[in-house]
Image (tube, rainbow, N blue to C red):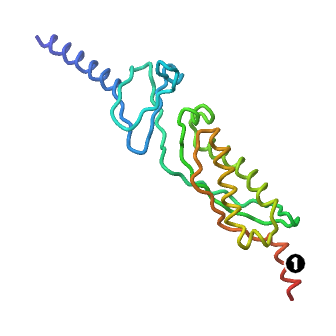
Amino acid sequence: MTALKSLGAIVGLVLLVVIMGCIFTVSEGQRALLLRLGKLTTDSAGKVLVYEPGLHFKLPFINTVREYDVRLRTMAVNESRILTEGQKYVIVDYYVKWRIDDLARYFQRTGGSPLRAESLLEKRLNNALRSSIGQITLLELISGERANVMRELQRAADATAEDIGIKVVDVRIKRADLPEEVALSVFERMR
């Protein structure tokens, strides 16, 4: 009788573990991908399945779940030396607000790594920033052209970020200063 109870308890415990392995939840602000033996799962039309917040089921030991935060993120970019149209260097600090827009593409392009996504995004934004600032003078950057530069930068960033499954929501220049050696020469001329 006790052997039968022990066997029943063991079977019940194993059954509970298997059932718990079949259920997964996706939290609010998250989306999930299901990988079957390391490959993305797709529906009958071949579209990658993206799981919304809620309770979902999977095959234990065969499927793995990868959850991603799809809320707005901020990436601060360290200062960059950029050459203006007037052949003057300017130091620019900026930040970007972005979020995952196409989870399947994001996973395929970045392996699901936010650091890889930010690295790709920063390279593309630096190129767009150099192109935008390279077409204006230092005076235009410091005066009213900054808003136009930011609009152009966001447009360029959004177009290039779409390729990696990211939506750029906002790009802002925090600071645009002269390098120290240029600033010193300007102050000397002012004296």
Q: Position of residue 168 (x, y in %)?
A: 59, 50
Q: How many marks?
A: 1
Task: Give the percent coordinates (x, y) of residue 47.
Answer: 51, 25
Residue 123 x %, y % = 72, 47
Asked where in the image residue 1 lies, by quadrant, the reply is: top left
* Nearer to the camera, 64 or 135: 135
| Left or right: 138, with 106 as reference point | right
Q: Indicate the secondary structure of the residue bearing disc 1.
A: helix
Q: Residue at x 65, y 54 (%)?
A: 154
Q: Position of residue 11 (x, y in %)?
A: 24, 15
Splitting the image into 4 quarters, where does residue 159 fall? top right
Q: Is residue 165 above or below residue 170?
A: above
Pick whichever, 105 or 10, lies toward us: 105
Quarter occupied by the C terminus: bottom right
Specify the amino acid type for callout 1: Ser
The residue that appears at 60% across and 54% down in the rendered structure is: 75
Which of the 4 image quadrants contains residue 189?
bottom right
In the displayed structure image, the side of residue 63 where residue 187 appears, left or right: right
Q: Is residue 15 above or below residue 176?
A: above
Residue found at the far left of this picture: 1
| Residue located at (27% from left, 18% from top) | 15
Mark 1 is surrounded, within 10 Å at the Cα level, by few (under 14), some (14 to 19) or many (20 or more) other residues, namely: few
Q: Nearer the viewer, residue 76 or 144?
A: 144
Per the image, the residue denoted by label 1 is 185
Q: Which residue lies at the image location 32% right of the left edge and 20% below the top edge?
A: 18
Task: Specify whether 27 is left or right of 185.
Answer: left
